[in-house]
Image: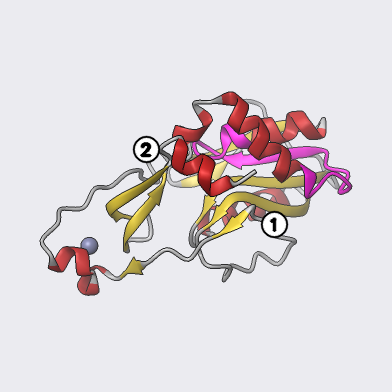
Amino acid sequence: MDILEILRDTGALLEGHFLLTSGNHSDRYIQCAKMTQYPEYCEDICRAMAKSFQDAHVDVVIGPAIGGILESYEVARQLKARSIFAERENGVLILRRGFEIKERERVLVVEDVTTTGSTTKEVIDLVKGYGGIVVGVTSIVDRSGGSIDFGVSFKPLIIVDFNTYHPDECPLCKEGLPYIKPGSRNIAK
Ligand code: ZN
């Protein structure tokens, strides 16, 4: 299974001029919701993520809302684990809806795309705050080029190193191309 091909075929891999959550600009953006429109693709991709942790005795799978909800749910289903998600309230990631993590429960963190890893790190801290054991992190795409260190096992399906530019040095800005903001921390991701 070629993950990039699936992302491209489903329109999840976008080319253009994008403002990333980090504030940097890029010529490519991955919108995984375009892929998860197709549950059979989502099932296949999540099977690959689940496989990396099939022997990790995962009790709970957690993802950050909204981007990580579908993937973490499907990974949990395949690992026969519980599925929960974290969401932002006043800018802080928390568990709501009666979700909880019990002390010593083994927790896998699932993301769609990791860029700087800041959201994922918040999820890890949240799990640890409940006394859970973070057995690892997986994502469909690590677009940091493999530079993120979570301090736990991190197994993304693919690692990409897309061009990322500081706004002052963005060649697309210099060409006068308008950028779009595909998702934001407060809304979509
Ligand atoms: Zn730009």
Foreground: disc 2 or disc 1: 1
Colour basis: secondary structure
Q: Which residues are magenta?
A: 51-71
Q: Residue at the spot x=57%, y=41% of the render?
A: 94
Which mark, residue 63? none
Q: CA distance from mark 2 to mark 1?
A: 27 Å
Q: Is residue 43 left or right of residue 101?
A: left
Question: Mark 2 vs ligand 1: CB under 8 Å?
Answer: no
Q: Position of residue 106 (x, y in %)?
A: 82, 46
Which quadrant: the C terminus?
top left
Residue at which label 1 appears: 155
Q: Is residue 54 magenta?
A: yes
Amino acid type at circle 2 is Ile
- Tell me where residue 36 appears, x and y as whole percent: 52, 31
Characterize the local packing of mark 2: few (<14), some (14-19) or many (20 or more) Cα atoms within 10 angstroms: few
The quadrant of the rendering that contains the N terminus is top right
Residue bearing mark 2 = 187
Query: Could you tell me which residue is drawn at 27 percent across and 52 percent down?
Result: 16
Q: Nearer the viewer, residue 84 or 129?
A: 84
Residue 165 to residue 111: above or below = below
The answer to whether any part of residue 120 appears in the image is: yes
Q: Which of the marked residues, 2 or 1, is nearer the chain's N terminus?
A: 1
Nearer to the camera, 80 or 142: 142
In the rendered image, residue 188, in percent from the top left (x then y), is placed at 40, 38
Q: Residues within 10 Å of mark 1 (few under 14, many from 20)?
A: some
How far from the left and from the top, in percent, is residue 127?
70, 48
Give the residue displayed 55% in from the left and 52% down from the top: 141
